Image (spheres, coloured by chain):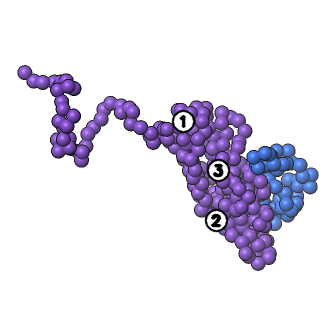
């Protein structure tokens, strides 16, 4: 007669040694693992933009086309936000190319509020050119932060840009060349 | 020079310091009418925008004249 079950009480705590349970072997789980603790990736949203870009000449933060939405499955979840692009700037006749960047958030269709970066200092750019210089530049721009939106409603994250005119920052800042991809990735991490 | 940058320069030649944003290029009057013009700043430091042009001196005709010179 073959044995198909062993009562729990029939196994000593140290009955299965590491030499019998091969920790280097591959096991194919077909069920669901629960109670595995925190840090689980629950979902990933991402968007890549090509073609039309946003041009900004404002010295205060202005919305761009680089945006994506995620709906957290729990209020305790954290959202890892990653935005990557190459911003372009042009100054027709000046001394600097400088710009500001920040991430804004809208919950459940509400108004946008700044959640990361966006201080008064430049996020990128350079200065020190002689007066009246024509300057064209491109800046690798990466914004990464972890948010705790504390909601299960839809959350929109959007890149905002501005000229740093306080530093004579240029005629415009754009979300890049029209043939340059721009990416935003949102990852929900379980508590 | 990309067309979007040409558009920014052309508007600034008509009125230096005008603040605005747009998506894509400004090649037609319909594109021009979609420009977002800054009218203020909200409590989050973000631009308050409107597509109603508050600068009477910046017209499609004047913009096009400057744009075509570039």
**Can residue A102 be seen in this snapshot?**
yes
Q: Residue at position x 59%, y 44% from top? A: A147
Real-space Cα distance between discs 1 and 3? 19 Å
Identify whether A110 is placed above or below A182.
Answer: above
Q: Residue at position x 85%, y 48% from top? A: B39
**Can residue B25 be seen in this snapshot?**
no
Give the SS element for disc 3. Answer: strand
Give the SS element for disc 1. Answer: loop
Give the residue at mark 2.
A138
Kindly indicate the quadrant of the structure image that contains residue A4: top left
Q: Residue at position x 85%, y 53% from top? A: B60
Identify whether A106 is placed above or below A180.
Answer: above
Q: Chain of mark 3?
A: A
Give the residue at mark 3.
A116
From the image, state the color of chain B. blue
Numbered badge on residue A53: none
Q: Chain of mark 2?
A: A
Kindly indicate the quadrant of the structure image that contains residue A125: bottom right
Viewport quadrant of the N terminus of chain B: bottom right
Real-space Cα distance between discs 2 and 1? 38 Å
Residue A63 percent across, percent down from the top left = 71, 48
């Amino acid at each position: 007669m073959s044995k198909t079950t062993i009562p729990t009480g029939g196994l000593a705590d140290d009955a299965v040694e590491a030499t019998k349970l091969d920790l280097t072997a591959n096991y194919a789980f077909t069920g669901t693992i629960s109670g595995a603790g925190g840090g689980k990736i629950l979902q990933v949203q991402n968007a890549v933009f090509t073609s039309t870009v946003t041009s900004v000449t404002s010295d205060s933060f202005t919305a761009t086309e680089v945006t994506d939405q995620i709906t957290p499955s729990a209020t305790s979840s954290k959202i890892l936000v990653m935005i990557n692009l190459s911003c372009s700037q042009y100054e027709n006749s000046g001394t600097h190319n400088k710009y500001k960047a920040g991430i804004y958030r809208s919950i459940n269709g509400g108004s946008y509020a700044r959640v990361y970066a966006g201080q008064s200092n430049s996020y990128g750019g350079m200065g020190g050119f002689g007066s009246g210089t024509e300057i064209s530049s491109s800046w690798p721009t990466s914004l990464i932060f972890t948010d705790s939106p504390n909601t299960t409603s839809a959350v929109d994250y959007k890149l905002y840009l501005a000229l740093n005119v306080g530093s004579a920052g240029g005629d415009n800042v754009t979300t890049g060349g029209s043939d340059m991809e721009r990416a935003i990735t949102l990852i929900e991490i379980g508590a | 020079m990309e067309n979007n940058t040409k558009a920014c320069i052309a508007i600034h030649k008509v009125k230096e310091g005008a603040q605005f944003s747009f998506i894509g290029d400004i090649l037609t009057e319909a594109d021009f009418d979609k420009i977002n013009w800054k009218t203020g700043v909200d409590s989050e430091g973000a631009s308050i925008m409107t597509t109603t042009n508050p600068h009477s001196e910046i017209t499609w005709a004047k913009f096009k004249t400057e744009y075509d010179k570039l």
